[in-house]
Image: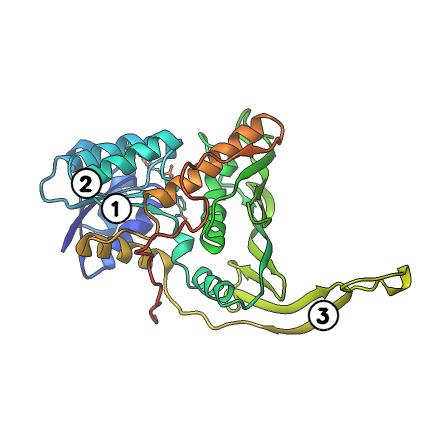
Amino acid sequence: MVNLGIIGCGYWGPNLIRNFNGLADSNMLICCDKDVNRLKRIKGLYPNIETTTEPATLFEDPRLDAIGIATPVFTHYKLARAALLNGKHVFVEKPITHSFETCLSLIEIAKNMDRVLMVGHTFEYTAAVSKIKEIINSGGIGVPLYISSVRLNLGLFQPDINVCWDLAPHDISIITYLLDQVPESVNCQGKSHYKKGIEDVATMTLNYKNGVIAFIHTSWLDPNKNRKTTVVGSKKMLVYDDVEQQEKIKVFDKGVDAPPYYDTYGDFQFSYRYGDIYSPRLEDYEPLGKQCEHFIDCIKQGLQPLTDGYNGLRVVSVLEAASKSLRSGGESVPVYYPYDHEKVLQPHAFQNTGTDG
Ligand SMILES: NC(=O)c1ccc[n+]([C@@H]2O[C@H](COP(=O)([O-])OP(=O)(O)OC[C@H]3O[C@@H](n4cnc5c(N)ncnc54)[C@H](O)[C@@H]3O)[C@@H](O)[C@H]2O)c1
């Protein structure tokens, strides 16, 4: 049994509490929030879980093996650091911290304390993203040419971070996982319409060494909830629509063949291919449950999580470059990631075998 505490019981924290509470190998002992009304709600749902307004109560609790953190981004570093230094395994919501330095510091502390550090890049635990990875790796769509990702909705406006730091971590983590590399540079443009300095709409371009390009469009100011990722390959094209209930992934046997050479304008003819569309079957499970289970497994078996500290660092590196680009009006900014930009997956990478139900 892994004894667990959660700090932050706002919008997202209760989802972690529900999932950890439902796992056979974890024991949700205590929850913390500085807002007592949040704690009352948790107590109403789970009368056996203890509550406190003081994070230190969790750090000093000798019964606890691990702490999950679902508080606003600027509090992550301080809370995660204290938890690690008190010998707890730590799970932190995305983005792992607000800067490269703070993230690296957590990685080093976790290493020195021999504790698991994991970030909540939930989409890497979805059946859909695992399936897309499988399709790409098997050459099913040919060589990836570009990826385009949109994550739009009306709200939720955040008071302290812009839309890039709020929504794009999901897209960056998905794209990094799929391409298995970190972009060399980023261009980012955005606009704040409601709160000065906090962009509510933005577009990001990620430029990769091997010529692949990726676009991410995020917005809190859109009439529709839209979560769609398109992967265009040299042979086929794939669309992942996370809002879709039944057929989340569609693979299109569509493409363009250019003539190998041409002498005259008349010879120059692209041929367009309009073939079949198929939707692969996906395992049916809650990704958050899979992610929580993976955290517990890593603690019990001493494994490195799929979404470990470096995985968090890669996303923060891209976000930092995007922030610099945003301030410069969209100039290209190199991504500072002083490790291998390619082959980023860890040797103990999680195998998503999926579960039914
Ligand atoms: N993985 C996902 O899909 C996903 C989805 C939504 C949010 N998140 C992440 O979850 C985290 C929290 O987001 P949210 O939307 O739940 O925010 P929120 O503002 O709704 O909740 C945060 C809670 O933390 C509490 N809190 C703040 N500082 C605290 C402190 N020092 N000690 C104790 N409690 C404190 C607040 O009172 C609040 O109840 C963020 O990192 C966010 O990016 C992840």
Sequence-wise, the earlier of marks 2 and 1 is: 1
Kindly tell me whether mark 1's CB lies below 8 Å from ligand 1: no
Which residue is labeled 3 in the image? 273
Q: Is residue 136 left or right of residue 122?
A: right
Query: Looking at the picture, which amino acid does disc 3 mark?
Result: Arg
Given the image, on which type of amino acid does mark 1 rest? Ile
Assign the N terminus to one quadrant of the image: bottom left
Quarter of the render that holds ligand 1: top left
Residue holding disc 1? 42
Tell me the CA gap for discs 3 and 1: 55 Å
Query: Residue 343, position in %: x, y?
Result: 43, 51
- The residue drawn where x is 34% and y is 30% is 102
Q: Circle 2 sits on which residue?
A: 51
| Percent coordinates x, y for residue 68 in the rendering | 26, 44
Q: Secondary structure at mark 2?
A: strand
Secondary element type, mark 3: strand
Question: Which comes sooner in the sequence, label 3 or label 1?
Answer: 1
Is the C terminus in the top left, top right, bottom left or bottom right quadrant?
bottom left
Q: Residue furthest left?
A: 62
